[in-house]
Image: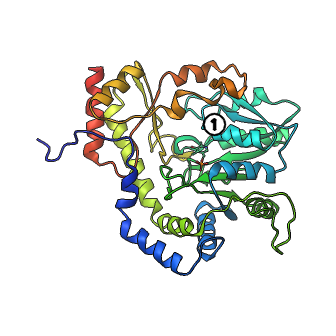
Amino acid sequence: MTPAAARSVPFFSYPQLFASEEEDLVRIFTDTARKGAFILQGELEAFERNLARYTGARFAIGVANATDGLLIALRAAGIGPGDEAIFCSHTMVATAAAIHFCGAKPVAVECGPDHLIDPQAVEAAITRRTRAIVPTQLNGRTADMGALGELAARHGLGIIEDAAQALGSRFKGQAAGTFGTASAISFFPAKLLGCLGDGGAVLTSKPAIREAVLRLRDHGRGSSGEIECWGLNSRLDNIPAAILDWRLARFDASITRRRAIAQHYRKRLAGIAELVLPPGPEEDGADHFDVYQNYEIEAEQRDQLRNFLKEQGVGTLLPWGGKAVHQWPRLGLEARLPVTDRLMERVLLLPMNTFLSDLEVDYVCDQIEAFYG
Ligand SMILES: *Cc1c(COP(=O)(O)O)cnc(C)c1O
């Protein structure tokens, strides 16, 4: 008998995001609030410097959330009405919404076997109006940026990465979010580096893009305080920035834990013929360093498996509520994407977060084994 074998495993536990660090978080809150340092203060600047250093980007600029960050990055890159931007339909609707709200047309394409944007599908979707590729670095994995970079260069396109799910992930040693003109990262509570509410950042290494992002996030204000363009109010608040800075210093340990859980799932589930697992942490050698924002499997009899797991107390999730972006008819994307349609009937997210114990991972795997007999 295992001493404290799990009986149920929630998909994610929001209360634990606070409970496990409560003392430190309260101290950070109190210290920052007592100074009256709420908007665009030193804690934000420190976090921006440390985040840039962590990723290898020259600049990081805090924004209210990653959706705003993408919109601001696209606008800073000069994408707008009359332009087309290509994205992978297997992404959060936010990727396409940012393209829509910058005035450009979102063009949805298929994903490849690793569930990330398919460079061949991108190439086939390029028209005279295409100005940008917006790859989503999905599930904590960075796309094949070699192929996408080559395509972008050949067709004169910009790359704006949706790196909302990929802080710490790398392709050939280079960090997600640093490949193109600019990128956006999310600090939504359930993201890799989560905050106690919404938050995001834009990464760029181009000084002119940085200046444009600083203006766009703060009412169009330039460094002199004069209004230089139309802008938004999309700042990252100072108290969350202080918390994020503290968490960033501990972030590598959480990535190590996620990769260990992915390895554990792999060891237990790789022999089940009805499943397709994501690439393991040690596969693809030097090319991909994955950080497992999510553990997205493909499963035969997906819905039956999901119901069975629910009965056994195991929480799972269908990505994006079960539909890729082009499958929401009211958005009017009108793309035919049979590979993605098929994939959306098979994908399932298993629990993947830093609170999971080995016993809980074993419990999830026991139940999956039991289901497939
Ligand atoms: C979470 C997420 C976003 C949006 O991030 P917010 O900070 O919530 O705006 C965008 N794209 C992807 C792929 C995401 O997972």
| Res. 150 in view | no
Q: Which of 219 and 125 is in front in this view?
A: 219
Please determine whether, in this image, residue 179 is positioned above or below residue 32: above
Q: Position of residue 186 (x, y in %)?
A: 58, 52
Is 196 situated left or right of 118 in this image?
A: left
Q: Position of residue 336 (x, y in %)?
A: 69, 19
Residue, far bottom: 35
Q: Quadrant of the N terminus?
A: top left
Its colouring scheme is rainbow
Q: Which of the 4 image quadrants contains residue 124?
A: top right
According to the picture, the residue beneath numbered tag 1 turns out to be 93
Q: Where is residue 368 in the image (x, y as percent from the top left)?
A: 31, 28
| Res. 131 in view | yes
Q: Which of the 4 image quadrants contains residue 121?
A: top right
Q: Nearer the viewer, residue 218 or 4?
A: 218
Please determine whether, in this image, residue 29 is positioned above or below residue 193: below
Q: Is mark 1 on a helix, strand or loop?
A: helix
* Residue located at (52% from left, 28% from top): 322
Q: Where is residue 4 in the image (x, y as percent from the top left)?
A: 17, 47
Count of labels in the image? 1
* Residue located at (32% from left, 35% from top): 314
Residue, far left: 1
Please determine whether, in this image, residue 250 is positioned above or below residue 37: above
Is 319 situated left or right of 73 in this image?
A: left
**Which residue type does callout 1 highlight?**
Val
Is 305 situated left or right of 61 in this image?
A: left
